[in-house]
Amino acid sequence: MKRLADFADAELRVFERPLPGPAVRDVYLIGICGTGMGALAGLLKQAGYVVRGSDRGEYPPMSTHLAAHGIPVHTGFHVGHLEPAPDLVIVGNACTPTHVEAAEARVRQIPQLSLPEALAHFFLKNRRRVVVAGTHGKTTTTGLLVHILREAGRDPGFFVGGLMQGLDRGYDIGSGSHFVVEGDEYDSAYFDKQPKFMHYAPHMAIVTSMEFDHADIYASWTDYEEAFVRFAALVPSDGLLLVCSDNVDPSCLAARAPVVTYGLSDGADVTATCVSSEGGVTRFTFVYKGNDLGSMRLPMSGRHNLCNALAAGAAALHEGLSAHELALGLATFRGMKRRQEVLGEPGGVLVVDDFAHHPSAVRATVQAAREHWPDRRLMAVFEPRSNSSRRKIFEVPYGEAFKGAACTFLCAPPFRHNDESQQFIDVHSVVQLITEQGSRAAAFTETDTLLDVLSQEATPGDLILIMSNGGFDGLHGRLMSTLKAKFAV
């Protein structure tokens, strides 16, 4: 990652930053409607602080969640929003040094923190910190571990980048000794270019996977890998590092903490045997350090989700839960929103939403859907929206990621100010790669045409799998409404 001094505008990024004092009461968040910032706002409100903020636009689900909890949000950015002056400004990582509110806070020397700094400052002290990191799977693994601990009565605090089914939030202060955090490797703020997970000082850490991502901030695989090496080194010698040996060579992390491996490959310390899957339910025998802990049930499909369950289970067992408590927690987990989330079945057409955006995540999601609903025609719909997924480096991997889908529909992303034309993905090249493998594929420049084609082609018994880490121009809801109208009796 770049050092602050390497930026052309380094003089705006390196400055004497006042830190919050003990009398903080009024907290202002710039970019409050983001998933992480909105969750942090909720935690602060839950802790009794006066919370307010701003964003470019108020958009659900976070805008409605904030409103329901009495957190006011300014639409747009203006220096006047900082009146009266808050005790602390939390700056989202989408802010640039010239952002009007961030710049005003800097000029007025209002105390400022990045999101991970604020989370650590207000909520992680005096807690047993468990941090889940990795390119893929960290949201579901975090949610699984939180659910297992909650079901066992441990009431952990938690902060996860997604909503757990059955809860209206991805955070809670909790009253127990544990605080479980999804550790993101993306940078923290314009004045804090460390990966977010470097702020969390874990007692226990999980690394689910490592695969080159976030090409907008990491120059190479070596650069990306180094972030995880530094993260693993944070775990103390009396802590524990859990590593998925299916995806990561533990020796590359050079951890000082004891390492326990998990996965489905030979030699893993924690693994599964007697695995079977049917109807979206995976049954398996949980094997922990050579000990058979009995048959368990996971209401999810896909090899990747079984590995997520092994990670969460190993962490729970290490923290003193029994095999019975683990089995109960796994069996009652309802999943995470936007992870194989069934939106409905209008006219017999099953519509499923998933957050997948990296090629490996797309491939795993398609395979899991094929396993879960083997008798349905799978129509895969994908929007390459993230900074990494829009890059040319992923064209070939995307061309191979949709195997198992009967047809694939891609929506070309708009060109952004920070995109480089020579590095920008060509979705038509991806379409060609898919068709060369014998599958049908098509690309669209806007969602209206894509919606028309989907609604015309969908027939009862189909599965439409929509994958995006954004709103996809409201495609999910628009498709549901169109299909309901099409098949209305």
Image (cartoon, helix red, strand yellow):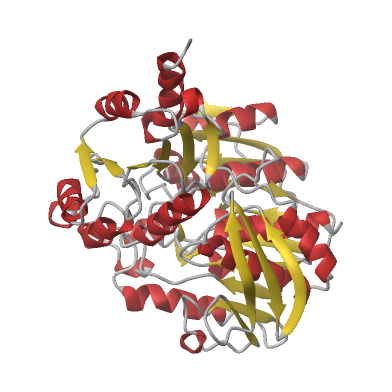
The quadrant of the image that shows the N terminus is: bottom left
- Residue 336 is left or right of residue 476, and the answer is right
Q: Farthest residue in the left direction?
A: 422
Vertical relation: 291 (above or below) 214 = below
Front residue of this view, candidates 348 and 14: 348
Instruction: Say above or below: 134 vs 169.
Output: below
Q: Residue at x 25, y 26 (%)?
A: 449
In the displayed structure, does residue 251 sit left or right of residue 238? left
| Residue 8 percent location from the top left of the image | 26, 61
**In the foreground, 407 or 470:** 407
Residue 102 on image: x %, y %: 45, 45
Is residue 174 found left or right of 4 in the rendered image? right
Residue found at the very far right of the displayed protein: 153
State left or right for residue 100 relative to residue 203.
left
- Given residues 16 and 402, the one toward you in this image is 402
Q: Is residue 190 visible?
A: no
Residue at 49% across, 89% down: 251
Res. 380 visible in picture: yes
Q: Name the spot of residue 293 as percent of width and height, x first.
A: 77, 75
Q: 178 or 104, which lies in front?
A: 178
Return the x and y of residue 444 as percentages of the image width and height. 22, 35
The tally of labels here is 0
Residue at 70 percent across and 78 percent down: it is 287
Q: Residue furthest front?
A: 375
